[in-house]
Amino acid sequence: MRTLISLFVCCMAAGAAQANDPPAAAHGAPAKAEAPKGELAKAAEAAKAGAAKPDAKADAKADSGKAGPVVVKQTAAAQLAAQRAKEGESEAELSAKIEVRLAAMRANQASRAAAAAKARKTAELQRQREQANAVAMASVAAATPAAPVFAHSNTWSYDGETGPANWGKINPGWTKCGAGNRQSPIDLRDGMKVDLEQIAFDYRSSGFNVIDNGHTIQVGVGLGNYITVQNRTYELQQFHFHRPSEEKINGRGTEMVVHLVHKDGEGNIAVVAVLLERGAANGMIQTVWNNLPLEKNQAVTPVVALDVNDILPKKRDYFTFMGSLTQPPCTEGVLWLVMKQPMPASPAQMALFSRLYPLNARPVQPGGGRVVKESN
Ligand SMILES: [Zn+2]
């Protein structure tokens, strides 16, 4: 009996110690139930009472046994048997209670372990998620170039993010603008002075249209205007203006330039550049200005004609080299013919253009060891 009580007290102490243990994880471990002291105390009292106080039946037997020694002996034996039976009953009862308590403690332990395991699993999942996010962010960062990214745009300009430095990145078809090695314009210096053949200009009075395309004023010219150079004939398609001039001669540019764009039967391009300086008014430029459109991208087709000869200088010396279009897509393989003698345009004519396009010139590009020839 004492052994059982000691065992019971041990269980109580262990249970209390476990209940007072700090939870295994910060979250999720359920609060432990208080040891059922009231119930256990009653059980202990009942056990004491069973040991100290004989029951009524045993008392009656003992009283009746006082009649003789045998009876007394029998009564004493019966009392002892009853006492043992009673003790056995109490022990069984206490054992059952201890079993119940142990089972409750085991259940508590199991639930606490499960809660701790769940908390550990949650923490691990969170850690894995964070790691996965970090890896994903790192791979996104690695795949994203630091330069501005354009999604296949056709928008370009002469300054800012869509300016000349980024043209090659704006559109996959414009890579030459950034990676080409025969780009225009260039600074014309140290040219090879040779007896260049004269360019045969075959221009005539023609119908035309004028369009403000958002990058320049462009004049479309009627059929029948040609140049012939290096045994190849090119037909004039259009001419347009830049301010300041894109070309430089020994590092010096002019206030404006006209580019006359020609194409031969195979699609080869030849551009004649005529530099414009301040001076007398130019009749052909005035005809164009007189017919400037009111809206961008809406062509004006005047009833008057235009004679493109009026924009050509008297002296026909020129520089020549292979280059590119000076705007996207910066196509290479373009034959450039830059007239050495500038043509005059009046300050008022220059000022009018600068109100529309104060700056629409690509910066000079690397020469890259190109051969530049010039008229002797
Ligand atoms: Zn141009």
Image (spheres, rainbow, N blue to C red):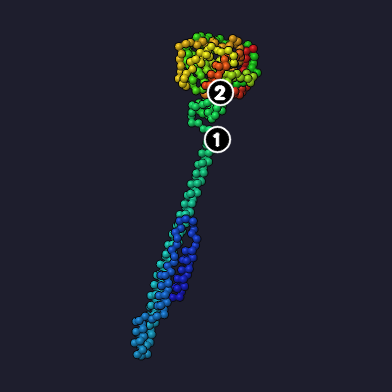
Nearest to the observer: residue 39 or residue 335: 39
Quadrant for the C terminus, please. Answer: top right
- Secondary element under disc 2, as helix, strand or loop, is loop
Q: Amino acid at mark 2?
A: Leu
* Residue 279 visible in the shown view: yes
Residue 88 in the image, given as x and y percentages of width and height: 39, 76
Nearest to the observer: residue 302 or residue 267: 302
Residue 254 in the image, given as x and y percentages of width and height: 60, 18
From the viewer's perspective, is 88 left or right of 315?
left
* Res 77 label: none
Q: Which residue is mark 1?
A: 146
Quadrant for the N terminus, please. Answer: bottom left
Cα gap from disc 1 to disc 2, whole angstroms: 28 Å
Nearest to the observer: residue 324 or residue 231: 324
Say if 64 sits above or below 366 in the image. Answer: below
Tell how many labels.
Answer: 2
Say if 126 sits above or below 161 in the image. Answer: below
- Secondary element under disc 1, as helix, strand or loop, is loop
Residue 192 in the image, given as x and y percentages of width and height: 64, 16
Dot 2: within a 10 Å radius of its alpha carbon, few (fewer than 14), some, or many (20 or more) residues? Answer: some
Q: Which is nearer the N-term, disc 1 or disc 2?
A: 1
Residue at position x 47%, y 49% from top?
125
Residue 358 lies in quadrant: top right
Residue at position x 49%, y 44% from top?
133
Q: Which residue is mark 2?
A: 359
Dot 1: within a 10 Å radius of its alpha carbon, few (fewer than 14), some, or many (20 or more) residues? Answer: few
Residue at position x 45%, y 11% from top?
303
